[in-house]
Image (spheres, rainbow, N blue to C red):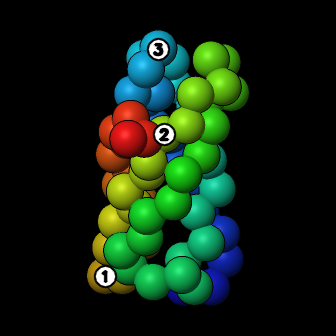
Amino acid sequence: MTEANSGTYQCAYCGELNETVVDPTGGPRQMYVEDCAVCCRPNVLHILIDPENPSVSIESEPES
């Protein structure tokens, strides 16, 4: 799996859905900060990529 995947997460602050692009070459477990497109507050994204079934799971939490 070498192409980028997209995923959706719910902002930890305002609850709005955001779409993000995930690079699978970064490994099956990733973590990075991305600002919400609606409220502009930083979300820590926890990314899990299943290598057996190319799916992306994203959870967000407020940046501390």
Which comes before the other along the chain, label 1 or label 3?
Answer: 3
Left of 40 or right of it: where is 57?
Answer: left
Q: Secondary structure at mark 2?
A: strand
- Please give the residue where the numbered disc 1 appears in the rendered image: 52
Q: Nearer the viewer, mark 2 or mark 1?
A: 2
Quadrant showing the N terminus: bottom right
Q: Nearer the viewer, residue 52 or 12?
A: 12
Q: Amino acid at mark 2?
A: Asn
Q: In the image, is residue 55 above or below residue 15?
A: below
At a point 34% along the width and 65% down the height, the residue shown is 48
Distance from disc 2 to disc 1, alpha carbons, whole Å, reads 27 Å
Where is residue 14? Give x, y as percent. 47, 14
Q: Nearer the viewer, residue 29 or 34?
A: 34
Query: In this view of the protein, can residue 12 be seen by the observer?
Result: yes
Q: Are marks 1 and 3 in contact (CB under 8 Å)?
A: no
- Please give the residue where the numbered disc 3 appears in the rendered image: 14
Left of 64 or right of it: where is 14?
Answer: right
Which comes before the other along the chain, label 3 or label 2?
Answer: 3
Q: Amino acid at mark 3?
A: Cys
Q: Secondary structure at mark 3?
A: loop
Q: Amino acid at mark 1?
A: Glu
Distance from disc 1 to disc 3, alpha carbons, whole Å, reads 33 Å
At a point 66% along the width and 18% down the height, the residue shown is 38
Which comes before the other along the chain, label 2 or label 1?
Answer: 2
Q: Secondary structure at mark 1?
A: loop
Q: In the image, is residue 55 above or below residue 25?
A: above
Q: In the image, is residue 14 above or below residue 42?
A: above
